[in-house]
Image (cartoon, grey):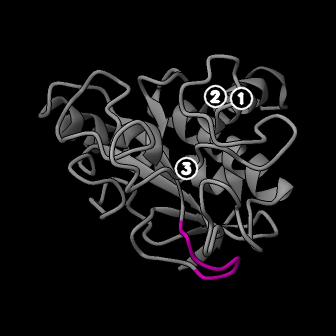
């Protein structure tokens, strides 16, 4: 596990772009970026995710080859990059616990999505960038498994809400932009449009 900058993350994703696209096309779809929380502690990193983001917003990669298939999203790992916040230990749908996503983590995840999406030539929308909760419920229209997310059996609901003013509570059927995935994609698109390149 090594720490990287946003520019280094872009370089790694750019180097993996062709392999990621080739793998995804083998499944008749575009590449995906899946967003997670680890359900662990703030500085506890896991090799299941390509990118781990600690409480202070620092980025760590588990591998320098972002096309490597890691075990982050059930039946969706091929042709995909997994990015995780190190947080949410003991979180429930009513209470994100003592280690909820930090402001630094949320902004760093949005910036990481922007950089990886740019390198992979992806639009930042739900078709290409999903939380694990959204993916678990097949919200992109692809159905490689039963619904096990917040609208199904609730086995995974990563980032369904962030515990912030923008995303204060668990409400998987919300259409007002307060779901965690909507907030994160919105922030990533803001960085894409406004941050210096």
- In this orientation, which residue lies closer to the viewer: 149 or 106? 149
Is 137 on the left or on the right of 82, as rendered? left
Image vertical order of residue 5 relative to residue 170, above or below: below
Is 27 on the left or on the right of 135, as rendered? left
Q: Tell me which corner region of the image, top left, top right, bottom left or bottom right, holds residue 186.
A: top right
Secondary structure of residue under mark 3? helix
- In this orientation, which residue lies closer to the viewer: 185 or 135? 135
Q: Which mark is residue 36?
A: none
Magenta span covers which residues?
38-44
N-terminal label among 1 and 3? 3
Q: CA distance from mark 1 to mark 3?
A: 32 Å
Q: Residue 170 in the image: x percent, y percent?
A: 64, 42
Contact between labelled residues 1 and 2, with CB atoms less than 8 Å apart: yes
Mark 3 neighbour class, 10 Å CA radius: few under 14, some 14 to 19, many 20 or more: some
Q: Tell me which corner region of the image, top left, top right, bottom left or bottom right, holds residue 72.
A: bottom left
Q: Residue 6 in the image: x percent, y percent?
A: 69, 52
Of the two numbered discs 1 and 3 in the rendering, the one whose residue sits closer to the viewer: 1
N-terminal label among 3 and 2? 3
> Which residue is found at the position 56% from the left and 78% from the top?
45
> Which residue is found at the position 42% from the left and 54% from the top?
156
Is 81 on the left or on the right of 26, as rendered? right
Q: Check disc 2 and report the residue beneath it.
A: 182
> Which residue is found at the position 83% from the left and 45% from the top?
164
Instruction: Assign the C terminus to one quadrant of the image.
Output: top right
Q: Check disc 1 and report the residue beneath it.
A: 178
- In this orientation, which residue lies closer to the viewer: 34 or 194? 34
Secondary structure of residue under mark 1? loop
State how many labels appear: 3
Q: Which mark is residue 11?
A: 3
Query: Would residue 41 be counted in the magenta stretch?
Result: yes
């Amino acid at each position: 596990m090594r720490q990287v900058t946003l520019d280094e993350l872009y370089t790694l994703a750019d180097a993996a772009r062709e392999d990621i696209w080739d793998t995804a096309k083998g499944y008749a779809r575009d590449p995906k970026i899946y967003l997670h929380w680890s359900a662990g502690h703030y500085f506890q990193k896991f090799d299941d995710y390509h990118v781990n983001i600690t409480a202070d917003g620092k980025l760590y990669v588990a591998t320098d080859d972002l096309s490597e298939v890691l075990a982050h999203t059930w039946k969706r790992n091929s042709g995909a990059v997994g990015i995780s916040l190190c947080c949410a230990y003991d979180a429930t749908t009513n209470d994100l616990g003592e280690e909820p996503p930090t402001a630094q983590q949320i902004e760093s995840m949005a910036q990481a999505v922007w950089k990886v999406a740019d390198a992979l030539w992806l639009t930042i929308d739900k078709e290409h960038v999903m939380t694990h909760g959204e993916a678990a419920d097949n919200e992109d229209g692809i159905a490689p498994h039963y619904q096990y997310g917040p609208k199904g059996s609730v086995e995974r609901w990563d980032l369904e809400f962030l515990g912030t003013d923008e995303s204060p509570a668990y409400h998987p059927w919300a259409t007002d932009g307060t779901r965690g995935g909507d907030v994160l994609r919105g922030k990533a698109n803001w960085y894409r449009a406004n941050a210096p390149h």
